[in-house]
Image (tube, helix red, strand yellow):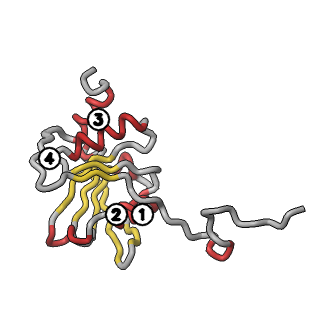
Amino acid sequence: MDSPTTPAGSTPPGDAHTYTMPLSRLSLTPEASHGPLDGAWWPRCDALELELPALVGSLDPGHGTVTRVTVGAATWADSPRTISAPDHVIEVVLTYAADEEHTITLDCGTVGQWELLVIPPEEPVRTAERLLTAAADPWNSLSAQRILARAEDGFGR
């Protein structure tokens, strides 16, 4: 019988509790946004404590350090109130406003805020790609709720 080996891409046994999420599926407006959104984020799962460090790590450092996020309580109710990111801790604030259910606001201290559409993790790839593009359009004037409603209608088809 062959000796056991570690599968390619897995962590060694000593690091059994270490896992790094892949880079975020994120689309940001190229410059200044003229709409209610600055882009979109498509997390892979609904565990904010796993997804948020990957999201923050994928942002350009010139955008500032994310110190607080505001997320919809309906989507992220079980999230911890603080999440560790590389070199700092991020405060998590839950909002109960219905119009913010599918958004995440990233507060970057004195640099400003990013308002992103949160695409549900189970969304089909083609729909998610359209949502990523639509929300990152600098001339988009639709809210997160309206963009998601258009996606459900097949984007006007």
Residue located at (21% from left, 67% from top): 63
The C terminus lies in quadrant: top left
- Which of the pair 21/6 is nearer the observer? 6
The residue mark sitting in front, 3 or 1, is 3
**Callouts 2 and 3 close, C-beta under 8 Å:** no
- Which of the pair 16/76 is nearer the observer? 16
Indicate the position of residue 85 as horizontal and vertical percent values.
39, 71
Query: Alpha-carbon distance for marks 2 and 3?
Result: 24 Å
The N terminus lies in quadrant: bottom right
Looking at numbered disc 4 in the image, what kind of residue is underneath it?
Pro
Where does label 1 land, which residue?
80
Per the image, label 3 sits on a secondary structure element best described as: helix
Looking at numbered disc 3 in the image, what kind of residue is underneath it?
Leu
Indicate the position of residue 115 as horizontal and vertical percent values.
21, 53
Where does label 2 land, which residue?
58
For marks 1 and 4, the one nearer the N-term is 1
**Tag 1: Cα neighbours inside 10 Å, few (<14), some, or many (≥20)?**
few
Q: Which mark is residue 138?
A: 4
Residue located at (24% from left, 53% from top): 28
Relative side of 145 to 48, left or right: left
Q: Which mark is residue 148?
A: 3
